[in-house]
Image: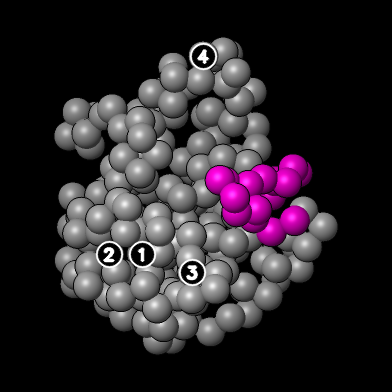
Amino acid sequence: MALENKLGIESSAELAREEEKISKKKAIEMFESGYLDTLRSGTFEALSLIHKYLFDEIYNFAGKIREVNISKGNFRFAPLMYLKAALETINKMPQSTFDEIVEKYVEMNIAHPFREGNGRAMRIWLDLIFKKELGKIVDWSLVDKEDYLLAMERSPVKDIEIKHILKNALTDETENREVYMKGIDHSYYYEGYATFKTEDLE
């Protein structure tokens, strides 16, 4: 069964294709319009606005804090009863160094504030912080899928691996749309259903 959506799609495979196509187009719009530069990097508000921009045409819950508990594999994300408090704590976390930024990213991943689409929105959010604070972004094409997923799985206990992976993938090509879009392309690749390349959406 597909998640309830504004498109009236009942097939999860069809919804995944439409979601990918629409959210990639919206990601390009965000980049081209300068919308991202208007957001306060590192805040939940910024993440919420990114999520809403990407998914508002698809889901009623776009940009809204989830109202259900969720888990992935054996990992359970922040329980609903603690979620708002966790987001307030994350908002206050420092973000002036590489280590602080990745620690904030790890905590936001544990919070997983949305019903769907957390990874896609959070990669843009992370790059926004890196760009503002360090003048760099992640070139996600340099990040191995399996290494990344395992490192993120282990990051609540030990974040040294994810720090190593992301540090090795940093680039100063912050205005390169192709590099920026690799984060979205790889989000779908990580989830096993990438269909459209960015250039196909022009």
How crowded is the residue under tag 1: few (<14 C-alpha within 10 Å), some, or many (20+)? many
Q: Which residue is mark 4?
A: 11
Q: Secondary structure at mark 3?
A: loop
User: Is residue 124 in view?
Assistant: no
Q: Nearer the viewer, mark 4 or mark 3?
A: 3
**Looking at the picture, how far across and down is residue 163, in whole percent?**
36, 75
Looking at the rendered structure, the kind of residue marked 2 is Val
- The CA distance from mark 1 to mark 4 is 32 Å
Res 24 → quadrant: top left
How crowded is the residue under tag 2: few (<14 C-alpha within 10 Å), some, or many (20+)? many
Res 93 → quadrant: bottom right
Res 131 → quadrant: bottom left
Which badge, 2 or 4, is on the more N-terminal residue? 4
Which badge, 1 or 4, is on the more N-terminal residue? 4
- The CA distance from mark 2 to mark 4 is 33 Å
- The CA distance from mark 1 to mark 2 is 6 Å
Quadrant (top left, top right, bottom left, bottom right) of the N terminus = top right
Which badge, 4 or 3, is on the more N-terminal residue? 4
Which region is colored magenta? 64-79
Q: In the rendered structure, does residue 127 fall within the stretch colored magenta?
A: no
Residue in view at x 51 percent, y 20 percent: 12
Q: Which residue is mark 1?
A: 127
Q: In the rendered structure, does residue 73 fall within the stretch colored magenta?
A: yes
Looking at the rendered structure, the kind of residue marked 1 is Asp
Which badge, 1 or 2, is on the more N-terminal residue? 1
**Looking at the picture, how far across and down is residue 125, in whole percent?**
44, 61
Q: Which residue is mark 2?
A: 138
Residue in view at x 31 percent, y 69 percent: 166
Q: Are marks 2 and 4 in contact (CB under 8 Å)?
A: no
Q: Does residue 19 lie above or below 142 as drawn?
A: above
- The CA distance from mark 1 to mark 3 is 18 Å
Q: Nearer the viewer, mark 1 or mark 4?
A: 4
